Image (tube, helix red, strand yellow):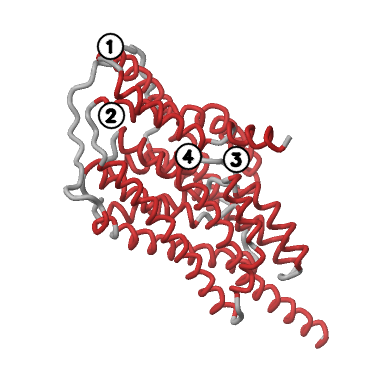
Amino acid sequence: MKLDRLLKALISSLLFWIILAVGVGVILGYFLNYGGIAVVVSINHIVRQMIMFIIPLVVFVMISSSITKVGNKGTKVIRTAFLVVIIDYVVAIIFGLSAGQLLRLFSPAPVYSYDPPELPTNRFPLHFDPLLTMSSAFLLALLVGIAILATRQHEKTKPVFETAETVVKWILKRFLMPLMPIFSGTTIALFVWRGGTSDMFQIIGITLGIIVGTQILFMAAVFGIASFLSKRNTFRLLKHYGGISVVAMTTMSSAITMNVVFERLSERNVLNKKTIEFGVPFFANTSFYGTMISVIVGIMGTSLAVYGSLPDFGPLLLFSIISALILMSSPGMHGGGVVAVMLVAEAVLGFGVLALALFFIIETLADPMSTVTNVISDGAALDAVDKKILQIEKESEAKVSHD
């Protein structure tokens, strides 16, 4: 019975299908002739057009919805929670940008630069032109979100955006995510057929190693920051996250792990009950710091692997800020945030098809450790908020006794 559940979980895992798709893509790239690779070109074209049609719509819903939700965040506790989230995202961006520079030291020399020969012509006649470009979707989301807040319409529009998010999540889960292994596999097949070298895969391996190392250092840093803010030893919470980390790594879902965190912390009585009831769902749906680090380092590794150089700092910083906003806007959308970030890479950094596919592969492979980092980092945030809640309760008790 346990074996059946394990196989079912494996088959339903995006990581499994991405690894399988990459393997199949490598085989096809080595053995297909010109006619066979022409079919792959057409399949890749169709899937890529579908993905690029859907993602701007997803980005518009996620970002505009996220902005409008800020309207009812007025209490001291929630302001503190948002401040903690912002600080930790800034730290994650700094860690990611700094760690990405290590790629220069560890990458193979000479760095592989991609210069492909001609591919067969695409034989699929139809084109799915996107309704919005990535830049248009982002700008429109900002305008709509800010206008709703300015006119105090966030309560009236809340049901509309909740419905839109439900629809978007269905599209992501049932339509878009199943396309990603096909997109990744066919892109790898085209790359191998055009004579790709092992340098690219070596850089990908190094990138994954740097991501994991940076995430571990980041967790130590945020627990240190939380200890400073709360004036107590936040590292004491780590002993309660052993089993939770296993669940996070195997499910690769903060939403699923959230229920386990809530149960374990409630049983151990290590934090205020109000902190757990508010903080666990709040941070599970806003704090994706491990993913933020893997996105930044992954994008830098991808750029090095495909284009032979790291992105310029200005565009890279802009990419990081927009990506943070997207990740905060994508709770419950497994893989959806990273898919949306792909179009940011295209719009801001000029990434092509191969780079986008490799970036998605890196993010999928890094997802287990990224989820662990997301979940454990929440422990540090919870402790900082717990101190604020205790302070507010003491002030309330003092006021009551004074009256």
Q: Which residue, given by chain and number where applicable, does mark 3 sit on?
A: 161
Q: Which residue, given by chain and number where applicable, does mark 2 sit on?
A: 192
Q: Position of residue 18 (x, y in %)?
A: 46, 34
Q: Which residue, given by chain and number where applicable, does mark 1 sit on?
A: 35
Quadrant of residue 264 within the rendered picture: bottom right
Q: Where is residue 55 in the image (x, y as percent from the top left)?
A: 45, 34
The secondary element bearing badge 2 is classed as: helix
Give, as a three-letter code, the residue at label 4.
Phe
Q: Is 26 placed above or below 134 here?
A: above
Q: Is 36 placed above or below 71 here?
A: above
The secondary element bearing badge 1 is classed as: helix
Q: Are marks 3 and 4 in contact (CB under 8 Å)?
A: no
The secondary element bearing badge 3 is classed as: helix
Seen in the image, is 63 located left or right of residue 379? Answer: left
Name the residue: 46% across, 42% down. Answer: 364
Q: How crowded is mark 1: few (under 14 residues within 10 Å), some or many (20 or more)?
A: few
